[in-house]
Each structure stands twice: as C-alpha cells, then as structure tokens.
Image (tube, rainbow, N blue to C red):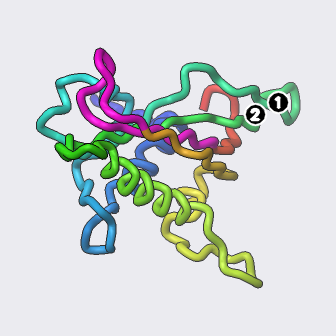
Amino acid sequence: MNIERPLPKRLHIIKSLQEVLEQISTIDGDSQTLKGKVYRNRSLLGVEVAGTVPCLSIIEAPRPDYATFAGEENTMRRDQWTILVQGIVGDDKTDNTGDDAYFLCQDVERRLQRIMATKAGTGNPQYPETYLLGGKITSVEVAPPIVRPPEAEVSRYAFFYIAVRLGVALQVGE
C-alpha cells in the first residue's frame, strides 16, 4: 500500500511560484517564453544549461532569515523566507552582452508583481488566481535585481538574481 505524503509547505510554495513564472510568454508581450524552463533548486551557472537558455531557477538564499515564534508553546512561526530567482540568457554576441538579461529580469518582476497586486481603492487582488500564491504566503517583498555579464569561471552567459522575501505562516514541522 503506497500512502501519498502531503507536500512540505515550502516545497508547495516554490512549486506555485514556479507555475507563475512559467507563464512568462511572448504571447503576453514578454521577451521570452519560459514554459518548461523554470527549475527548482538548480544552479544555472554551469555549462549544463547550454541547451536550455533562457531559463530560470528558484533557489533558497544560503542563510535563513529570522522567524518570529507565536502561538501556544511557540508551535507556530511567522517566517520571512528569502529565495532567489536566478535567470540566465544566451550570449547575444554584441558589445553589450547582457542586455537580454535586463529584458528577462523585467519579465520576472512583472510576474512577481502579479502575486502582490491589489486594486486601487478596494484592496482586492488584481490577479486573484496568483495573489499571494493562492493564499500560501502572507506577504511578498522584491529586492532590486542584480544583472551580471558573462564572467570567467562563473558563467559563460549573462545572468541575474532577484531576491524575493516571502512571508510564511506555518506550524513547526509543516
């Protein structure tokens, strides 16, 4: 008998964010189409991504933020969870290599904005289907992106990072 286990809450959140980012599409006016090119917990800076650029990966920041304990006997936590959205684009073979990274970065920021956008005056979600990732998170903060050109021994492609802080309320062990 195979019993299906529920997804850990953080994995559920990352999968939901992955679905939102995979909606980036030239049909919607974005610079790229990323369906099937958004990964979880995968570093994109090596030669192993040569056939998949442009693409994104969602990875956790190397250090956790502090949590606030709440509830009886501190069994609940309000976490501020920092994740990184890493993007990589192909070499555009120009003197201004990396310009494409700015466009893809802008596409990612527009999708992240949908997660937190509310209607003026009402405060209701502007995009209810993606607002706070369907109620899986309590808040979103997006830091300024960092765009980098190809660098020897780091990446042969231009890339960017965007730090995203997610508010997560959960029971310890969830």
**In the depicted structure, whether residue 98 falls above or below residue 104:** above
Is 121 magenta? The answer is: no
The reply to whether discs 1 and 2 touch (Cβ–Cβ < 8 Å) is yes
The residues tagged by marks 1 and 2 sit, at their Cα atoms, a distance apart of 5 Å
Secondary structure of residue under mark 1? strand
**Closer-to-camera residue (99/69):** 99
For label 2, the residue is: 77
Q: Which residues are magenta?
A: 148-165
For label 1, the residue is: 69
Q: How many marks?
A: 2
Name the residue at 68% across, 38% down. 170
Horizontally, residue 76 falls left or right of residue 117, namely right
**In the depicted structure, whether residue 165 falls above or below residue 19:** above
Name the residue at 56% across, 39% down. 163
Residue type for callout 1 = Phe
Task: List the single residue furthest toward the top.
Answer: 153
**Closer-to-camera residue (77/72):** 77
- Return the x and y of residue 71 as percentages of the image width and height: 85, 36
| The C terminus lies in quadrant | top right
